[in-house]
Image (cartoon, rainbow, N blue to C red):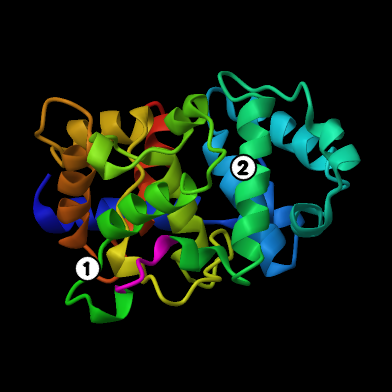
Amino acid sequence: MEFLELKDFLDFKVEQYNQPGFITNDPICIPHRFSKKQDIEIAAFFAAILAWGQRKTIINKCTELFQRMDNDPYNFMLQHSDEDLKRLLNFKHRTFNDTDLLYFVSFFKFHYGMSDSLETAFLPDNFGQLDSFTAEHALNHFRTYFFSLPDSPRRTIKHISSPLQKSTCKRLNMFLRWMVRKDKMGVDFGVWNTIHPSDLICPCDVHVDRVARRLNLITRKQADWRTAVELTEELRKFDPQDPVKYDFALFGLGVEEKF
């Protein structure tokens, strides 16, 4: 496809899939059950981190998780007693278990004790002095900060990726998209204002990767952080201010249309 033809095709697919109807069958439906900003952040974070396997299973596991917190996650993070924490025991999804979950809870309690938004967890202390700020800075800082508590279990490290590990960081890039992107369609939340849509990197899951290669948007052989950056650089040619909106098009083509 020629450049303009491909742009028109992808813009059409964004319009098709960036619709409220997309929410119901996607893990993004979990944070859409909440209205308070901090509840949305926490629900979105867990929904993204647990986004392995079939979407229906992910939604069911997240539903179970928040039922254990009385569907009041922000309040649970700040006010839970040791007795409350017992309700989280035996929670499991794939390789994520209650040891990981209890550490996540202790991190949220620590962070929200100092800040009223999870966005600040992605901003380095010298953020104001940086000449340029990218999702790479945000994700590398977040992983270091997330595991800065003295009781962080070794086994939990695998659940939070970063570009330093050369990971595509699919789940965290998806979470950032949900929190940062703003448009009138209301699928993404756009509740954060310091990180901009132009800073984001496209979540590169197997469906997006496959479709992007078919469309010659990825040439790199392996799937790693540089692959996600390469894809995003190509998408920036279509829309430099909001390249990650094309995640809707690529994911929709891969999952719904088996492109």
Q: Position of residue 221 (x, y in %)?
A: 12, 26
- Element type at marker 2? helix
Is 217 left or right of 113, judged from the image as shown? left
Quarter of the picture holding the C terminus = top left
Residue farthest bottom in this picture: 128
Question: Is residue 90 on the magenta stretch?
Answer: no
Say which residue label 2 marks.
104
Mark 1 crowdedness (10 Å alpha carbons): few <14, some 14-19, many ≥20: some
Q: Eyeballing the image, is 220 above or below 228?
A: above
Q: Position of residue 99 (x, y in %)?
A: 65, 27
Which residue corresponds to the image point at 43% horizontal and 46% vertical from the top-left? 172
- Asked whether 117 or 170 is in front, the reply is 117
Q: Position of residue 57 (x, y in %)?
A: 66, 25
Question: Is residue 125 on the magenta stretch?
Answer: yes
Quarter of the picture holding the N terminus = top left
* Location of residue 129 by image quarter: bottom left
On the question of residue 27 being in view, the answer is: no
Amino acid found under the numbered disc labelled 2: Phe
Is 52 left or right of 137, judged from the image as shown? right
Bounds of the magenta segment: 122-126
Which residue corresponds to the image point at 63% horizontal and 53% vertical from the top-left? 108
Is 156 left or right of 66, judged from the image as shown? left
Which residue corresponds to the image point at 69% horizontal and 27% vertical from the top-left? 98
Which residue corresponds to the image point at 17% horizontal and 77% vertical from the top-left? 131
Say which residue label 1 marks.
240
